[in-house]
Image (tube, rainbow, N blue to C red):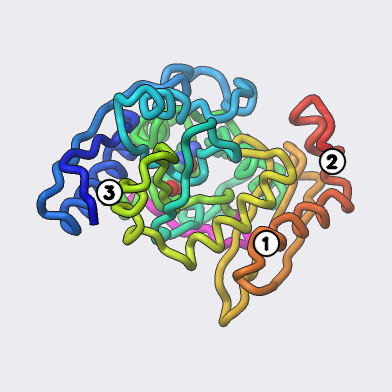
Amino acid sequence: MPTPSLLRIATRKSPLAMWQAEHIKARLEALYPGLEVELVTFTTQGDKILDVPLAKIGGKGLFVKELENAMLDGRADIAVHSMKDVPMEFPEGLELGVICDRENPLDAFVSNKYKTLAEMPEGAVLGTSSLRRGCQAKERRPDLEVKSLRGNVQTRLGKMDAGEYDAIILASAGLLRMEMDERIAAFMPAEESLPAGGQGALGIEWRSADKDIHALLAPLHHEVTAHCVLAERAMNRRLQGGCQVPIACYAIIDGDELWLRGLVGSEDGQQMLRTELRGAPEDAEALGIKAAEDLLAQGAGDILRAVYGHDVH
Ligand SMILES: NCc1[nH]cc(CCC(=O)O)c1CC(=O)O
């Protein structure tokens, strides 16, 4: 295989992003002993704007644009993304076709005081800026105060430790990757907090013209994860959602079937629409679109219009 001798990974500077880039660097160096892999770091808009809930900033791909520009300008060769944060559409000249084996995709309940959401006393403060996590928590516990929480994982944990929140919800994957397992009071079952599309999976983006780089990355691709994430993203795309919307979707392979669950909820948790379906993993994309159509038929368009400020076509 024609192997480039140097590969530059564009990455954000947050500890989790750095861990993910280092992880891919280590895997590539283990596969190709002659290859040198370098990290090129960036601070993105999403890292800079910390005082506004993400849903209100509105721009999709807040965490990826700088990285994509660096690849297009030739300052870097690939970018490693949490699939949850990757927009549906890629700029001309870039593609994302390698999806790696998934870490635990579930949300984590994190607290120094309580073991589960159910244990929290009336009126306790739950931290999350995710409309998806917030609406599902409020559905079960309308009495809780859900308070906005931004910043990288360490910042969020620090705010909870300082007493600003009684509990917070984070992705298990981030905590597990950074060896902060002891922070996880409980993995939240999918029935309690259906994850975001792509949560726990890493994807790699590169310049479409760089066929050598695609060949180099191909061994990191994990087909089962790719089918699941494809179904989830197809549902999100049909609903025009990213991870900053009250939309959850989660697929697993159950036996030889792909089992996709989807949810759209109103911010206050009063109106929760759910769907689930099963089918062949090869039909992942069609299953995702079907799930979205089911939710739209139940009235998801009205909920999403209130969040987006425009219709879902
Ligand atoms: N939105 C930020 C973000 N993007 C990816 C992860 C976690 C790792 C992953 O899902 O792969 C997180 C942190 C969180 O939601 O707690």
Q: Which residue is mark 2?
A: 301
Determine which of the numbered discs, if any, sits on residue 261 in the image. 1
In this view of the protein, which residue sits in the foreground, 37 or 82?
A: 37
| Whether label 1 touches label 2, CB < 8 Å | no
Which region is colored magenta? 183-194
In the image, residue 110 sits, relative to residue 307, either above or below, namely below
Q: Secondary structure at mark 3?
A: helix
What residue is at 81 percent from the left and 30 percent from the top?
306
In the image, residue 10 sits, relative to residue 185, either above or below, namely above
Q: Main secondary structure of the magenta part?
A: loop
Q: Earlier in the sequence, mark 3 or mark 1?
A: 3
Amino acid tagged 3: Ile
- Residue 33 is left or right of residue 156, and the answer is left
Residue 51 percent coordinates (x, y): 51, 17
Q: Which residue is mark 3?
A: 24
Residue 52 percent coordinates (x, y): 56, 19
Q: Quadrant of residue 205?
A: top left
In this view of the protein, which residue sits in the foreground, 37 or 294?
A: 37
Residue 266 percent coordinates (x, y): 77, 40
**Where is the N terminus found, in terms of image quarters?**
bottom left
- Residue 235 is left or right of residue 59, and the answer is right
What residue is at 69 percent from the left and 57 percent from the top?
288
The answer for how far apart the CA atoms under marks 3 and 1 are is 29 Å
The answer for how far apart the CA atoms under marks 1 and 2 are is 18 Å
Q: Earlier in the sequence, mark 1 or mark 2?
A: 1
